[in-house]
Image: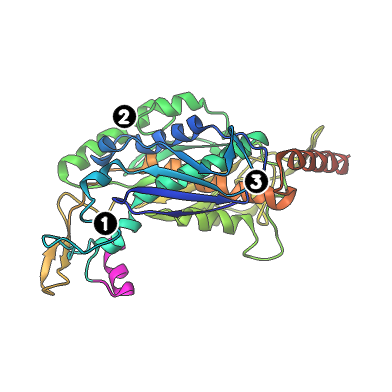
Amino acid sequence: MQFVTAGESHGPALTAIVSGVPAGLRISESHVNSDLRRRQSGYGRGGRQQIETDHVEVQSGVRFGVTLGTPVCLRVPNRDWQNWTDRMAASGSAPNDLVREVTPRPGHADLVGILKNNSDDCRNVLERASARETAARVAAAGIAREFLAELGVEVFSYVTSIGSAQYEESDAFMRCGKYNLADIELSEVRCPSAEASQKMMKMIDVARIKGESLGGTFRVVATGLVPGLGDFSSGASRLTSKIGAALFGIPAIKGVEFGMGFQAASLEGSHVHDPIALTHDGFTRTSNNAGGLEGGMTTGMPLVVTCAMKPIPTLKNPLETVNIDTMEPALASRERSDVCAVPAAAVVGEAEVAFALAAAYTEKFGSDNMHDIKANLASYVDRIRTQSR
């Protein structure tokens, strides 16, 4: 299963085409719209979220709520397009009063993008490089999430830090998957701890007053996975590589770690590797420091991956830059922006992980139709249980 997105931040709409979707998968627009709402929510979001009310329009590949086995096309309209029709028109000439963006923002794709594409207007870059594009990814991932749910897999996320405010949890990798997801959703910053949530919100309030922005970390967890998804035979085929690449594709993500991550580098091996045990269901691990992946393959334990997000580059008090027209020092441009988008990025992280896992399942168990996939999965589970006896 794969997807591609198209569309600009202030264009008519964002579009996603999902290919490799099995026939016979029931799709709920309400579930997709719920994820789109979660992406728009979270303490620290900016004015754009007051304009947009994201919802998905299924254009193809689904009939009577069930996939046909053909590409699924999804559309998320941009309500703000009505304010940008002259400046972002796909045809005709630019208006005489068009104001070009000539003061690239440090930390954004603006400058490098115009150098790469020989452009004199940062707008030609920032429209696509905007995090607004991730709405299409979340919509597309609705297909992957429905697919995984049919196979008993759940993907969720929570925020572990914003700025210097952190959620402290002990033995997190053994306890993952046991959170009350309703409590996470009720928190305005999607953190399981009410105390930590309050500290994070206070940091966001201070940053807003100072004209600053904040980054942080979030954790994505997938439960219900079978062992053996992915591969060990080449670097590119390892599921670790695929999930890491997908998460690094999210704007502003600067670090990704699985399980213990960097902490494992400072410990002795006996405190890192997960002992193997045997239960009536087959092989298992007595801890999950690896975060559910060994040798580039799932172990059957919960997948645990943590991402670090940098602060948003658009600042109320902008940094110094260079005007690309005059080549003189200037202050960076100011787009309407968030103070902190870590809770929203966590939802996008879920989307990327869900797609990587859905692709791994179809690679191993087929992609023609849900009936055959479920039969293949059941046969595989029976076989590995027998192998452990």
Location of mark 1 (residue)? 89
- Magenta-colored span: 107-119
| Helix, strand or loop under label 1 | loop
Q: Nearer the viewer, residue 294 or 247?
A: 247
Tell me which label, 2 or 3, sits earlier in the chain.
Answer: 3
Q: Are marks 1 and 3 in contact (CB under 8 Å)?
A: no
As shown in the figure, which amino acid type bears the numbered disc 1? Answer: Ala
Is residue 262 something one can see in this rendering?
no
Amino acid type of the residue that numbered disc 3 sits on in the rendered structure? Gly
Mark 2 or 3: in front is 3
SS category of the residue bearing label 3: loop
Name the secondary structure under disc 2: helix
Marks 1,2: beta carbons within 8 A: no
Residue 261 magenta-drawn?
no
Coloring scheme used: rainbow
| Three-letter amino acid code of the residue under disc 2 | Gln
Q: Residue furthest front?
A: 92
